[in-house]
Structures are given as C-alpha cells and as structure tokens.
Image: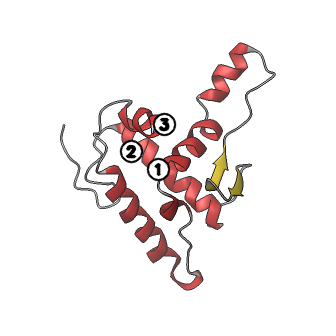
C-alpha cells in the first residue's frame, strides 16, 4: 500500500474502507457536538457505558429491508463511534475554537486507530469485536 501524504487523512489508514470508517466516526462526533445537522442519530448516557450513539432499530422489518439498514450509515456509524474510547466520545468542543477542537479529536482518533492494522474490513471488524 502507498501511504498518502494528505494532511486531512490519517497516515496510518491507507485503505479506502478504513478512510470511510474514520470519516463516519468523525461525522458522528460532529453531530454529537452540534457542528452539523443531526439527521436522526440518537445519543444516550448510561452510568455504566457512558455516552453512546444508538444504532437504528432493525427489528420487526422484512429481511431485505433489514439487510439494507444493517449496512447503512445510521447503523454502522453509531456502532463505530461507540467503539472508540469514552474519553474521545465525550470530548467537548470549545465554542471559540471549533476547528482546533475538531483537529484535536482527529489527532486523538488517529492515535487510537494507529493500533489497529488497516486491512480491508479490519477496522470495522476489530472495533466491533472489542
């Protein structure tokens, strides 16, 4: 694999799938802190699990629709977000330094993802199996 020198993409993630999953986590974070409009992602706080994004409900629907929902943003992105450390999930944005706060989140996320080998299907599967 060739590692891209793009400053906006983690140097540890080279596969397109890995980049897509990283962007999903970042987008859920932006929804949580109110930097982008929330399309319907629900967050809940539980004393045991702390802050979590709730994946879409796939029960009581036919198999074909359930399979489509299971691979949608509304199911995968919250599950990915829930696998990152609590300290990242609960990281707040300071109102006057939004851009710096997002960059801080990305840096910390990249540090976490650096410990996961970037192989096709590996980031999602590794994160969801933990």
Q: Secondary structure at mark 1?
A: helix
- The x, y position of residue 38, in whole percent, is 70, 56
Q: Which residue is mark 1?
A: 23
Which numbered disc covers residue 128? 3
In which quarter of the view is residue 105 placed? bottom left
Mark 3 near mark 2, Cβ–Cβ under 8 Å? no
Q: Residue furthest right?
A: 60
Q: Which residue is mark 2?
A: 19
Foreground: 8 or 62?
62
Task: Look at the image and tell me whether residue 65 can be seen.
Answer: yes
Q: Residue furthest bottom?
A: 96
Q: Earlier in the sequence, mark 3 or mark 1?
A: 1
Work out whether 50 lies above or below 99: above
Badge 2 crowding class, 10 Å Cα cut-off, few under 14, some 14 to 19, many 20 or more, is: some
Which numbered disc covers residue 111? none
Name the colouring of the figure. secondary structure
Mark 3 near mark 1, Cβ–Cβ under 8 Å? no
In this picture, residue 64 sits left or right of residue 21 = right
Report the residue at 47% width, 68% height from top: 102
Question: What's the distance in space between the residues labelled 3 and 1, CA to CA?
Answer: 16 Å
Mark 2 near mark 1, Cβ–Cβ under 8 Å? yes
């Amino acid at each position: 694999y060739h590692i891209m020198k793009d400053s906006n993409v983690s140097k540890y993630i080279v596969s397109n799938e890995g980049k897509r999953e990283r962007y999903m986590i970042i987008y859920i974070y932006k929804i949580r802190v109110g930097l982008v409009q929330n399309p319907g992602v629900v967050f809940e706080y539980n004393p045991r699990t702390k802050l979590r994004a709730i994946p879409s409900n796939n029960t009581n629907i036919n198999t074909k629709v359930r399979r489509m929902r299971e691979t949608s943003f509304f199911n995968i992105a919250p599950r990915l977000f829930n696998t990152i450390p609590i300290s990242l999930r609960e990281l707040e944005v300071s109102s006057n330094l939004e851009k710096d706060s997002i960059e801080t989140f990305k840096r910390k996320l990249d540090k976490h993802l650096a410990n996961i080998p970037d192989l096709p299907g590996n980031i999602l599967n590794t994160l969801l199996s933990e």
